[in-house]
Image: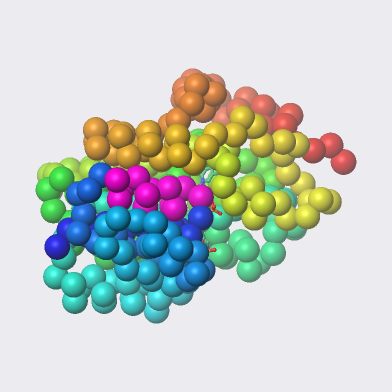
Amino acid sequence: MRISIVTGASSGMGREFAKQIDALKENDEIWIVARREERLNELKSQLKTACRVFPLDLTKQEDIDILISALASSGGEVKYLVNSAGFGKFGDWSEVSRENVNGMIDLNAKALVNITASVLPYMKRGSRVIEMCSVSAYLPLENFSVYAASKAFVLSYSYALRAEVRHKGISVTAVCPGWVETEFAACAHNGDKVNGPKRLKPMTSAEKVVKKAVRDACRNKPVSVYGITWKAMHLMSKLLPKRAMMLLWHGMQKRK
Ligand SMILES: NC(=O)c1ccc[n+]([C@@H]2O[C@H](COP(=O)([O-])OP(=O)(O)OC[C@H]3O[C@@H](n4cnc5c(N)ncnc54)[C@H](OP(=O)(O)O)[C@@H]3O)[C@@H](O)[C@H]2O)c1
């Protein structure tokens, strides 16, 4: 049985990945994971491929264990693993709560690594890992520091993992979008008085970002970046000193 697993499938890009992987018709089952069960059931009713709903909080190890136990008893092989669950909170070091700081590290970095390492034994030649990263992985971001650091971790991990599993014929692609129209921005806003960027532009649709990500994963690309602005930023981050890039971001912050 061929299974694909998509985390963060109740919303935004995760939801879009589930739809686009469904359209590939390469799977016997798609497993969709997030906390909001009703959203997952609604998505299930829209997919043509058989679907299993996992209402799990991935910051809890016992919930990750439920997913992996189900995989062990299924006897299936995993075609696509998409780790899209993640969140960010704007604010300086004093404005983001301890709970949210730990949540970003636990979900964006720790859960992603645990799920990836637990699913890899069920992957074969031609299987694909897609790790949701961000353009924020390229540089330290004031007022988004922990989020950007968590994504820098994911980017570094994805490159190294890719080298480790290449001989097995498994691909790893880090997806690095700029701002995308999802629930992410509403969640990131941490109140009007909190430090953060003035505006989030340009915004792209989740559909376009995911379409390119699936295509890039199928072409075995290490990184997927959608849009000219964000490709330029990727290039600049390689050419310019970090300090210059950080000054650019500094200029985009709200003035108080
Ligand atoms: N949108 C952007 O501008 C943007 C840009 C670059 C990178 N990204 C990254 O892209 C990924 C997808 O984000 P998105 O834009 O699609 O945001 P989104 O619409 O807010 O989706 C986030 C998903 O993560 C799930 N999630 C949150 N906390 C969870 C938890 N504790 N356990 C399990 N699932 C959890 C949410 O589901 P529940 O709430 O139902 O659990 C939701 O399905 C994230 O990793 C994000 O960092 C986003």
Q: Is residue 24 left or right of residue 198?
A: left
Q: Residue furthest right?
A: 256
In the image, residue 10 lies in the stretch drawn in magenta: no
Res 3 quadrant in image: bottom left
The image position of residue 159, as x and y in percent, is 32, 41
Q: Does 134 appear above or below 61?
A: above
Q: Is residue 113 visible?
A: no
Q: In the displayed structure, would residue 252 be above or below residue 86?
A: above
Please give the count of numbered marks on the rendered protein.
0
User: In the image shown, does 180 or 20 lie closer to the viewer?
Assistant: 20
Residue 189 is left or right of residue 114, and the answer is right
Type of secondary structure dominating the magenta stretch: helix
Residue segment shown in magenta: 12-23
Compared to 118, does 164 lie above or below? above
Q: Position of residue 168 (x, y in %)?
A: 12, 48
Give left or right: position of 221 versus 57: left
Residue that appears at 64% across and 55% down: 187
**Residue drawn at 66 percent across, 36 percent down:** 200
Q: Percent position (x, y) of residue 71?
A: 23, 70
Q: Is residue 22 magenta?
A: yes
Q: Which quadrant of the figure has residue 172?
A: top left
